[in-house]
Amino acid sequence: MCAEFAGTMILILFGVGVVAQVTTSQDGALGDHDSIAWAWGLGVTLGVYVAARLSGAHLNPAVTLALAVFQGFSWRKVLPYTLAQTLGAFVAALVVRVSYADLIAAVDPEHTIATQGIFSTLPGNGAADVSISSAFVDQVVGTAILVFLVLALTSAWNNPPMANLGPFVIGLVVVAIGMAWGANAGYAINPARDFGPRIASLITGYGGAMRDQNGYLYFWLPIVAPLVGGLVGGALFKLLVDDHLTDPDEEQTEQVTPDGGREAVGEPIPEPQDQHQPQDQHQREAQPAAR
């Protein structure tokens, strides 16, 4: 829980922080959409590096739920992980709120919808005319993409990134989602990422934090839709990839026999072990998520 709290806090410090910087800067002098996408992705990468060894660095309730349903993650840890992630996001958002208080007050002294998007997502990013149903579908699709790729990149049998590069590649996944799926609903793709900062903004002056720019109650959508999307992504990965993978240590080589048939030959060659060093029986496999 400490690791999930810390990792998610790092993620939000960079993610919400960059949105605050861009939103409060004059004429985009301190950033634009691309800088937002890159900072969110780097925030995911750094958060995963912080938490991966202790908790697996889920950093996202949608990922935690998908891992419990499809990858055997302990159900008794789902709620504690979710609470830790949400609290980490809440604390990080408070830090950003206090640090950027003067700049926010300068551009939006009434704390309106104009700067509410610093902390939480809105349909059409608070400007474009996007329906609730379109925003819901967008969040399902975006989170499904995230979870599908997280599982693909962390499966030990699926040729994952080596040399501890997994967190970096997963950060690139979040950058890509931000650049391709950010228009309809701000790519929350993470219930903790949205709800924690939303509560932080609500208690610090944003009275309309639970509603969108049209006055509709909106806080539930970036919670429910990503959870649904995580299950969709997890199910698709299991159906299309995971069920067809085999343990490389159990694979056998085939050769063509004189009659044109095939037969298995040889046994898997074990990797050499240093007899002077104890073997590490605990494979460290990060299963993070993002934003």
Image: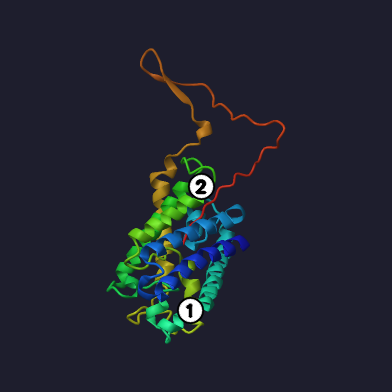
Q: Around disc 1, counting alpha carbons within 10 Å, would you say few (fewer than 14), some (14 to 19), or many (20 or more)? A: many
Tell me where residue 200 appears, x and y as whole percent.
Answer: 51, 77
Question: Residue at coordinates 56% horizontally, 47% vertically from top-left?
Answer: 285
Q: Around disc 2, counting alpha carbons within 10 Å, would you say few (fewer than 14), some (14 to 19), or many (20 or more)? A: few
Tell me where residue 158 appears, x and y as whole percent.
Answer: 46, 41
Res 165 label:
2
Res 253 label:
none
Position of 78 with respect to 110 (left or right) is right
Direction bottom: furthest residue: 110
Question: Residue at coordinates 40% horizontally, 74% vertically from top-left?
Answer: 23
Vertical position of residue 276 compared to residue 56: above or below: above
Q: Mark 1 points at which residue?
A: 201
Decide: marks 2, 1 in contact (CB < 8 A)? no
Q: Which amino acid, mark 1?
A: Ser
Question: Residue at coordinates 51% horizontally, 58% vertically from top-left?
Answer: 64
Helix, strand or loop status at disc 2? loop
Task: Between residue 280 and residue 175, name the one nearer to us.
Answer: 175
Vertical position of residue 230 compared to residue 101: above or below: above
Position of 270 with respect to 188 (left or right) is right
